Image (cartoon, grey):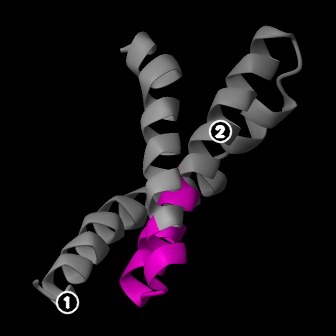
């Protein structure tokens, strides 16, 4: 699980973020923009979480204590859930509205 979270997940999120950015720059559609925003939110939250664990291992645990605050953790969980629901929804919306050749 640690290999997935620290090794593969950031690469997967970066790949999805770049793909959503390319799709939005080529099409300028609302569904592509929603995908880009959802993927950006997840990427930032995962990056902050990994930075907090890195700083905690370097004996600077202020950020980890901040993101483990129940109020901050609740907001982060709501954003993650909303993004994980919104990204595939926007993808399906884009596919359905795409013109067939």
Q: Which mark, by number, is residue 88?
A: none
Q: Quadrant of residue 1?
A: top left
Magenta region, main secondary structure: helix
> Sequence order check: which comes first, mark 2 or mark 1?
2
Report whether residue 15 is seen. yes
**SS of the residue at dot 2?**
helix
Q: Position of residue 44 (x, y in %)?
A: 64, 50
**Residue positioned 22% across, 82% down in the render:** 93
Report whether residue 68 is seen. no
Q: Residues within 10 Å of mark 1 (few under 14, many from 20)?
A: few
**SS of the residue at dot 1?**
helix
For the C terminus, the image quarter is bottom left
Indicate whether 75 appears above or below 51: below
Tell me, yes or no, whether the two marked residues, 2 and 1, touch with CB atoms within 8 Å: no
Q: Position of residue 75 (x, y in %)?
A: 56, 61
**Residue positioned 42% across, 69% down in the render:** 35
99 horizontally vs 71: left or right? left
Q: Position of residue 33 (x, y in %)?
A: 49, 78
Q: Give the residue at mark 2.
A: 47
Extent of the magenta region:
23-42
Q: Which mark, by number, is residue 97?
A: 1
């Amino acid at each position: 699980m640690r290999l997935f979270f620290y090794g593969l997940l950031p690469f997967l999120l970066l790949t999805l973020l770049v793909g959503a950015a390319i799709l939005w720059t080529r099409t300028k559609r609302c569904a592509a923009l929603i995908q880009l925003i959802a993927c950006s939110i997840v990427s930032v939250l995962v990056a902050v979480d990994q930075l907090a664990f890195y700083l905690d291992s370097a004996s600077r645990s202020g950020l980890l204590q901040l993101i483990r605050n129940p109020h901050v953790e609740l907001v982060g969980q709501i954003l993650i859930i909303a993004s994980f629901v919104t990204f595939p929804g926007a993808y399906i919306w884009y596919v359905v509205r795409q013109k067939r050749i």
